[in-house]
Amino acid sequence: MANLEERVSALEAHADHHTPAIDAARADIQGLRSEMGQLRGEMAQMRGEMGQLRGETATRADIAEVFRRIDRVDGKVDRLFMWTVGLMVSGFFVIIGALVGVAFRLPG
């Protein structure tokens, strides 16, 4: 039967093996956060443009352009949301995989 030090070192080796994947997931999430911040800035800019359009007499072409921009922003939000959910799910699987790997590979 392995002593405590061997078991701890085996656990540390398994944890070190999964650390780069978790760090990569964190970096991806931080990148998504910055993109979301940019998207929020674009949306605030659109709100300002919409306020200007309300103050002016808007033609049908102007309204159509606003709707096209809203559709583009909606597409960006959908894509970023899917990325965020995908990263969360993959992070969950990484953690579960690490726990399962540690549970089945520990000597003793």
Image (cartoon, rainbow, N blue to C red):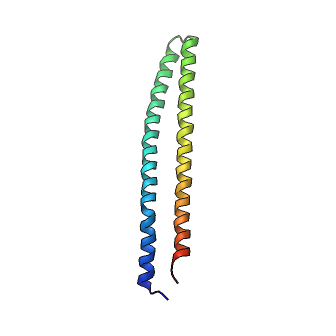
Q: Quadrant of residue 16?
A: bottom left
Q: Position of residue 59 (x, y in %)?
A: 56, 10
- Looking at this rendering, what residue extends furthest in the bottom direction? 1
Q: Quadrant of residue 103?
A: bottom right
66 vs 4, nearest the viewer: 4
* Residue 21 versus residue 39 in the image, above or below: below
Q: Position of residue 18 (x, y in %)?
A: 46, 64
95 vs 49, nearest the viewer: 95
**Residue drawn at 50 percent across, 15 percent down:** 55
35 vs 22, nearest the viewer: 22
**Residue drawn at 56 percent across, 22 percent down:** 68
* Residue 57 versus residue 25 in the image, above or below: above
* Residue 42 versus residue 17 in the image, above or below: above
**Residue drawn at 41 percent across, 77 percent down:** 9
**Residue drawn at 43 percent across, 78 percent down:** 8
Total labels drawn: 0
Q: Position of residue 95 (x, y in %)?
A: 52, 63
Q: Position of residue 80 (x, y in %)?
A: 52, 40
